[in-house]
Amino acid sequence: MEIDPFIFRLSIFILSIFIGYFVVWSVTPSLHTPLMSVTNAISSVIIVGAIIASFSSLDGSSISFSNILGFIAVTLAAINIFGGFLVTQRMLQMYKKKKKNK
Amino acid sequence: MSANLSSMLFLITGVLFILALRGLSSPETSRMGNFFGITGMILAIVVSILSVDIFFSNLIYFIIALSVGGIAGSIIAFKIPMTAMPQLVAGFHSLVGLAAVLVAISAYYSPDSFGLGAFQNIKTASIIEMGLGVSIGAITFTGSIIAFMKLQGLMPGSPITFPGQHYLNALLGILIISLIGYLAVNQSTQIFWMLVVASILIGFLIIIPIGGADMPVVISMLNSYSGWAAAGIGFTLENTALIITGALVGSSGAILSYIMCKGMNRSFLNVILGGFGTDSTSNNTKEKTEQKPVKSGNAEDAAFLMKNASSVIIVPGYGMAVAQAQHALREMVDKLKKNDVKVSYAIHPVAGRMPGHMNVLLAEANVPYDEVFELDDINNDFANTDVAYVIGANDVTNPVAKTDPKSPIFGMPILDVEKCQSVLFVKRSMSPGYAGVDNELFYRDNTLMLFADAKKMTENIVKYL
């Protein structure tokens, strides 16, 4: 009997939750705000769905309802990707160690 | 690109995202982590563009969409003041939610492009995943908009409650689950849109009863939702990168919510049901206030006390963020250090409006992160410290949390500032904090109240140092 591919995806999902659990507990509390902005940026990987929607077409000529939704979703995800990673970068650059007195 | 190759590359994206979060375990490795995250994202975008059939007319619109979003996002990222991070993150969450909704709608109308079957004849598993994705996405969308408006001050931060609220929410919840079930059977357009509308509505309804100071929990919770929404869409699209990322973000948000709830000693359910701090305790506090004497001082007194101390602990709270006092505070600390005073900072887990909010503000003001301590690491030091400088914090220092079982904040872990030899409280007035509880520290002999705006007071103290 063949295993449904859904089971494989579910396995990946469940194991990733555990990875997330352990990785996030090891994040230092002082970096919780960058953690939120970076998780926000990476969840915009939903742009892969928006890209499929943007180019979904049967004949490759007219622009469909799905295409328009796709373009809007690409715009939103792009705001998030650029905004999320850049603001995280900006925050992380502020974290400095104490300068040693000479 | 073959499906197997693209799946492999999406898996690599997932791994890079895991490394991005792993990097945040210390500030030194965090910048490398962010680099991994960016690489993973670029990889995911390139792979998905190479996997679809590109045709010219749509490519132009796609590039326009990507550039407009990218430029807008970059401008926001560079312009946003650090004090506005909570509302920025809330706003970003709403975009993820809306993007998830749009992708799900698009997949519902053109399932053939997504490889899910034909219109209204989608595989049963896919339509259920799609239903879940669109529903969680819509809840994230409206919930985050409400959170954004509350944080930005576009609507009152106080809880909005009405009779029968919980029943209405429960009813809507049941409706959503039944609609998803029904959608799996007949896939009709009406049911699909009813599901979208019901989810949009409940997203709005579950956030309005939650008050401003509970926002750390709400933002973390919405962070988690945006992850589950992405995972739901990931199952629909059968995309490994989305499933892994959704799971990572979902569990990250859940852990942060848990940490925030623990910081307030409240159950998650208690926060979500909302309406905290609206009971009638404020009347009783007024009477007490009139009876007890309070010692109040000016900047000169405060400067004198701190200059002659050998150690000072700074306790910042949301008030510091509101007054933008972090730079003045750093200046004050620099002067104290020149007088050989040992200074450190103590951060309560729920200080501010989002997890880690105070740490970012202090980092912005060039405070080295190894002078900033979490509650558990510094709480024993208060007993050996001369002065605690409490700036914009209140409830998180209230000893009533340890002594009065009837108090709404009883059991909440607090910073033991009362163990210091003297406590300086910068506050604009005697008004109680968010929990509506009077802080008995105000009336103690070793407490000196400094009634002023946090920034102005700190600047004045600098002058006298």
Image (cartoon, helix red, strand yellow):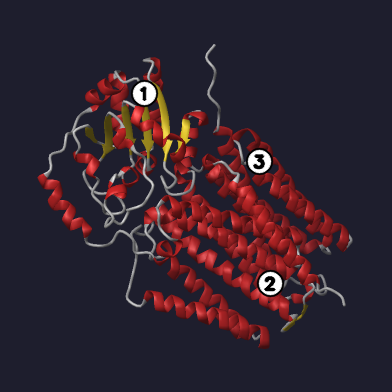
Position of residue B326 relative to residue B410, above or below, is above
Q: At 77% across and 70% down in the image, what residue appears?
A: A7
Under mark 1, the amino acid is: Ser
Q: Is residue B48 left or right of residue A37?
A: right
Rounded to the nearest angstrom, the CA distance separating label 2 from label 1 is 61 Å
Between the residue at mark 3 and the residue at mark 1, the CA separation in whole angstroms equals 33 Å
Q: Earlier in the sequence, mark 3 or mark 2?
A: 3
**Which chain does the residue under circle 1 lie in?**
B
Judge the density around disc 3: few (<14), some (14-19), many (≥20) Cα neighbours within 10 Å. Answer: many
- Mark closest to the chain's N terminus, 3 or 1: 3
Toward the bottom, the furthest residue is B186
Q: Tell me the residue that label 1 is attached to.
A: B311
| Mark number displayed over residue B106 | 2
Look at label 2 and name its amino acid.
Answer: Ser
Q: Residue furthest top?
A: A102
Residue B404 location in percent, x, y? 26, 52
Residue position marked by numbered label 3 in the rendering: B23
Q: Quadrant of residue B408?
A: bottom left
Kind of residue sitting beneath label 3: Gly
State the image quarter where residue B78 is shown: top right
Q: Chain of mark 2?
A: B
Q: Are marks 3 and 1 in contact (CB under 8 Å)?
A: no
Q: x, y (%) of residue B110?
A: 73, 75
Residue located 17% across and 56% down the image: B284
The secondary element bearing badge 2 is classed as: helix
Q: Quadrant where the C terminus of chain B lies? A: top left
